[in-house]
Amino acid sequence: MSGSPSGRGWRLGAVLAALVALACVVTLAVRVVTAPADVEGDGLAALRPATSPSASPATSPTTGPAPTPSLRATARAADPESARSGDRAAPPVRLRIPGLGVAADVRPVGVQDDGAMVIPAAPTSVGWYRYGAAPATPEGHTVIAGHVATREDGPGALAPLAGAREGMRVEVTDADGVEHTYEVTGRESVRKKALPVDEIFARDGAPRLVLITCGGEYLPELRAHRDNVVVTAAPVG
Amino acid sequence: MRRALAATAVVAVAALPLALTTPAHAADDASVVVVHGVPDLTVDVYGSADTTYSADEALLEDFEPGTVTDPVKLPAGTYNLAVFPAGDDPSGDPAIEATDVEVPAGANISVVAHLDADGNPTLTPFVNDVDPVAAGQGRLVVRHTAAAPAVDVLAGGEAVFSGLTNPNEDSADLPAGTVSAAVALAGTTDPVIGPADVDVAEGTSTIVYAWGSAEDDNLALAVQTIGGLHSSPSGVPSGTAELPADSTPALLLGAAGLATLAAVGMGPRARRSRV
């Protein structure tokens, strides 16, 4: 009638094995469905300058011959000492994205001989474009970039950027010890050749934080990735 | 390195009948800076459409040597400029006058009151190069506006601009940084001015004027800067190796396969032992 003890054992085993197989497949499916898309949130939209239909200021045209200048000029001392540029905003020194487990030292960087931004070699460091805005600068984009991975050291500090989600907190500490808090507004994967550098490195417009690493297909012959992963964040508080 | 001198020469006198009849829009306004490089003379500067000057045409009052104005927006047109000793009645004869100074729409111009090579006061308009500089670089422009013979401009002890004469300029785009600049008579390395640290800021044109008089031993430097000439980096090469592949999906797939095999293998046994 009822199966032998050994028969029951086999049945239980078969059911358990089937359940395990199902669980694995479901987990895979969930991973595929929730995998980060190429565009999250507003993508790069936040970096684009707001365009109003009539950008030119409404001014009444001056007509007639040779207008008389009515403007007063202000003079200032011009010796090399006083002409030197004044204090610049404190550079960022530390970057944290708690939601992604990102924590990295930030170093000021410039450009390579080929005109591209310098990226620090150490995988635990990321580079801040020192000619652009700093977190305390009232206008423009603070640009911080880091390797996704290097041959020598494996994954870099910004490797998790591909998983950045809208609303995630980003904390940047500057050299004065001031902490600047941002919230992710978007993420987008862009072909490197199509990276909108003028929008990303803009020195005017609303203050934004732009984080950049690499992503997409790896092209071994170029020792480079096809895409840049760009995360935009807006200051909060 | 030598840049054309044409731009520096008096832009004046060129006929501009069109500009005078075309309405000027604010967006097309020229940006004009006035530089004072005549030693020992505090002045008032007037600008007028004709050659008579009145008090309400004063651009600048009590303008001191070695100073530079902020940029002033001027509608395109042809102007007459006059410099009077500070406080003098502008209806008299000006100390320096430049007539028919053409200010083209959208131009960026520096008008310099200075001594010519022989020591006579003069006004020279320079058209500023506001083309963008490469990312990471700044532009250094040097203008000879002093009563002095031809000079060499030295940076770090070496001549970077040679044989510069009044009222001409030379320029170079350099990696941003501080340049220790000195001016020596052409062919010599003994500084007659400086050395002085000049900040060549990124994305900025730094214009250095040598002014004063060699004879009176009051040669000096004046600096004007024009910002906003920066370019963006060409790209962000942020990865030299492939991110190690995520092995979790493969593991999951493998486990699912094994478990399926096990289930299939155990099923018949379970059925057989039921009998």
Image: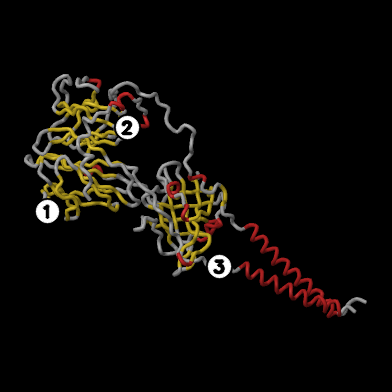
Label 3 CA crowd tier, 10 Å (few <14, some 14–19, many 20+): few
Alpha carbon distance from label 3 to label 1: 62 Å
Q: Is residue A141 left or right of residue B36?
A: right
Mark 3 — residue?
B245
Alpha carbon distance from label 2 to label 3: 58 Å
Query: Which label sits on residue B189?
Result: 1
Q: Eyeballing the image, is B51 above or below A153?
A: above
- Identity of the residue drawn at 23% across and 28% down: B60
Look at the numbered discs 3 and 1 and tell me whether their residues touch, using CB distance below 8 Å. Answer: no
Considering only order in the chain, which callout, 1 or 3, is on the residue closer to the N terminus?
1
Q: Eyeballing the image, is B209 above or below B97?
A: below
Quarter occupied by the N terminus of chain A: bottom right
Which of the two marks, 2 or 1, is nearer to us in this view? 2
- Identity of the residue drawn at 17% across and 36% down: B37
Mark 2 — residue?
B105
- The number of callouts visible is 3
User: In the image, what residue type sits under mark 3?
Assistant: Ala
Q: Check the residue under mark 2 and report the chain it is in.
A: B
SS under mark 3: loop
Quarter of image, res B121: top left
Quarter of image, res B120: top left
Callouts 2 and 1 on one subunit: yes
